[in-house]
Amino acid sequence: GAVVSQHPSWVICKSGTSVKIECRSLDFQATTMFWYRQFPKQSLMLMATSNEGSKATYEQGVEKDKFLINHASLTLSTLTVTSAHPEDSSFYICSGLPSGRETQYFGPGTRLLVL
Amino acid sequence: GQQLNQSPQSMFIQEGEDVSMNCTSSSIFNTWLWYKQEPGEGPVLLIALYKAGELTSNGRLTAQFGITRKDSFLNISASIPSDVGIYFCGAGGGADGLTFGKGTHLIIQP
């Protein structure tokens, strides 16, 4: 149980375009989902907390207008990287928090390369 | 922001040796977790700790939640080749996002 999927697993896009990444909890409901970013050989850094039916909470230094988050249902959160630039190239990982639980479960990640 | 100090940064060991890594923080946390991440994949939960002083095992892995709630360690006994990977400590939990350590890169020589 507690399986999280992400789509796509990797994406290459041109600078200036927007990219949408989906995060789904497959066998549980997640009132809260989280989005992390990981640069090569570095740790995961929390970008934002996504709450179903409400606005996301962004960490300091993360632009909410650039990283749009929509948590429309208890099993789906999306992250849209708008007007992507090469410096946005990274590994984006989401996690889901099963309702009433304390432990997050992570998706397999989405590797974004902006040319 | 909050930071976790994880050490060692990397370990080169022989197969069969025991491994020990730890994380410390200047802040108190109510949950400590240990994850393993392999290249190109998301972190996989190994052990979750919810009470100060708690000692929990998962096969050859043992982790403890420090009594001060500011530290945790992970031990791996009798290492095998498939233990290779990057191990992250994480703290926080619940509706709060996790703060991660910088990871311990484990390399095992046969």
Image (cartoon, coloured by chain):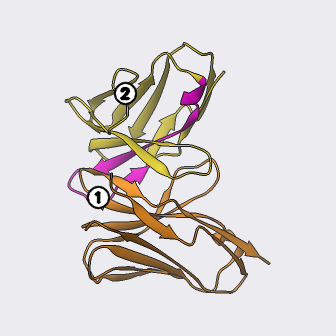
Chain colours: A yellow, B orange
Residue A52 magenta: no
Residue A91 magenta: yes
Q: Secondary structure at mark 1?
A: strand
Q: In this figure, which residue is indicated by the disc labeled 2? A: A63
- Amino acid type at mark 2: Glu
Q: In this figure, which residue is indicated by the disc labeled 1? A: B93
Check the image and report above or below for A80 versus B30: above
Total residue callouts: 2
Residue nearest the viewer, comparing B41 with A59: A59
Please give the name of the residue rendered at 55% of the width and 13% of the height, measured from the top-left corner. Answer: A16
Cα gap from disc 2 to disc 1, whole angstroms = 23 Å
In this rendering, which labeled residue sits more in front, label 2 or label 1? Answer: 2
Question: As drawn, is A45 to the left or to the right of A12?
Answer: left
Q: Residues within 10 Å of mark 1 (few under 14, many from 20)?
A: many
Check the image and report above or below for A98 versus A57: below
Residue projecting furthest to the top: A16
- Amino acid type at mark 1: Gly
Residue nearest the viewer, comparing A10 with B11: B11
Question: As drawn, is B71 to the left or to the right of A85?
Answer: left
Task: Where is residue A103? Give x, y as percent.
Answer: 32, 59
Question: As drawn, is B79 to the left or to the right of B100?
Answer: right
Check the image and report above or below for A112 versus B79: above
Stretch in magenta: A86-106
Kindly indicate the quadrant of the structure image that contains residue A60: top left
Please give the name of the residue rendered at 27% of the width and 83% of the height, measured from the top-left corner. Answer: B67
